Image (spheres, rainbow, N blue to C red):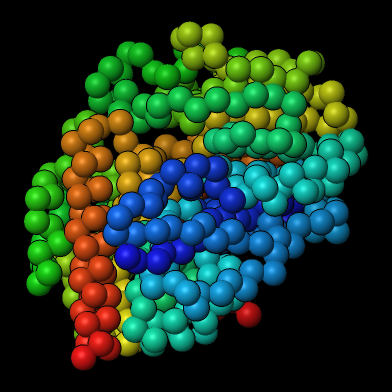
Amino acid sequence: MKTIGLLFNGVWSHYTFATAPKYRDIIKLIYVHDFDKDAIKGLKALIIPFQSNQKAIVQHKTTIYNFLAEGHKVFVEGDSTMDWIDAKWEDRPVNNYWWVKDPKNPPISETDFSHPIYNGLTPRHSCWHTHGSYTSMPSSAKAIQKKPDGEIISWETNQYGGTLFATTLDPIVEHGVQQITHLDNYVDKLIYWLSGDKVSGNFEVPKANYGIAVL
Amino acid sequence: MIRAAVISSGVEGIESYFLSNAKVNYEVVEVTKNFNPDFSDIDLLIVPNGSDHIAMSKIKDKIRKFLDQGKSLFCFDGWFTDWIPGNQWVMSNEKKTIDIRYNIKTDKYNLFDGVDLNELIFYHGISGWWACGYIENAKNADVILEDTWHRPIIVLDENTTNGTILLTASAPLGDKEAIPVDNEASCSALSKLYHNILDLILKKKEHENHRTLI
């Protein structure tokens, strides 16, 4: 049964992630231009990934906060300014080569490993690269991950009813891109935290998934 | 001057990816719920990295008609839907990125003039950073660039339609901001390649205008 909605911007990494056999029975692709309250009815959680259409999403701010008010979870990959969220995101250079140049100094220096997503993950599995920083977060939010300079990478709050979790990591998109091979660790923990669904095995996308027609 | 439309799927920063200059004027076309753009005054359609291929597939007949009018299409993204005539992009994690190298195969227009191929292969010593997957090219299309396993990475197709199709395997091209690197050499190599491709389109347009005049 599909338990998690993924707000889909027609981007290829969203598609490969959600249609991979490993996740396809759990993830419901919701095309952003068809998004409404009926699209997320019955779901436990919503994922808003990197490379989303923020202009389209802001029109559905009430739908997202109503979903949270019902006690559900929303996971946001922050890579841009989001006018629908009470936090300030700022761009920063992406360091995706630290593990070659300076492996003892990853972009994230502090992680709350008591959080269910991170509990049991190694530091390497909880940090690959970041896309900017949060320089402010909602009034009751708690920082979950920080950079060496103190800037916030991941935060969580329950002040809207359910749980809103935001991060400048991009586990969904990078897993869909299939070039960081350890992401099963993070994403499988994330899926379990969002919905209680346990997944295992490797991430693969059948070639037949490409070249589809849209009616 | 080339009149170009850049498709935007609402991803922040797209306006800085392609900067209008003496040879090209860009217009950003936003994908909306009822996406039905008018390309009648456009010579070149650009689909950058991070585009909405559900929206593109919904207008695939319009794009085919656009190309059959002799116009041009650049796609620098992974098109998992079937909207590009004759050519299909496929993602694959079968090969290791550490083994990825590129070779120039058929470059009859010298698009790689002044481009250091190594800057496309390595970024801070890491290979496989630029493109994703490969292209299953149309029968009569030119494979300009291929990878270690002879899989097409850049394809130029002047035969499937009456127009010109230039495709990369989800490898970003454009002005500096379109290229997600902090390495000046890689930036300039990719910008140079992009402008060489633009120059080809400009020459074709000027040739067409000249032919129409006489």
Residue B212: horizontal and vertical position, in percent? 27, 88
Task: Give the quadrant of the N terminus of chain B.
Answer: bottom left
Q: Tell how many labels.
A: 0
Position of residue A71 in the picture relative to residue A26 (left or right): right
Residue at (25%, 68%) from the top-left corner?
B202
Q: Quadrant of residue A77?
A: top right
**Which of these two is toward me, B169 or B99?**
B169
Above or below: residue B109 compared with residue B112: below
Query: Residue A134 placed where, x, y %?
Result: 60, 22
Q: Is residue A106 visible?
A: yes
Judging depth in this view, the residue of A47 and B165 nearest the camera is: B165
Whether A35 is drawn above or below B58: the answer is: above
Q: Residue at x 62, y 73 (%)?
A: B36
Up/down of A150 relative to A36, above or below: above
> Residue extending furthest front?
B213
Viewed as shown, does residue A207 lie left or right of B31?
left
* Rendered-image quadrant of the C terminus of chain B: bottom left
Work out whether residue A152 or residue A43 is closer to the camera in this orientation and state it: A152
Q: Is residue A203 visible?
A: no
Residue shown at the point (44%, 43%) measured from the top left: B16
Image location (x, y in percent) of residue B157: 26, 78
Question: Between residues A73 and B116, which one lies in front from this camera angle?
Answer: B116
Instruction: List the single residue furthest toward the bottom.
Output: B214
Q: Position of residue B180 (x, y in %)?
A: 36, 39
In the figure, residue B159 lies in which quadrant? bottom left
| Residue occupying the point 25% across, 40% down | B187
B13 shown above or below A35:
above
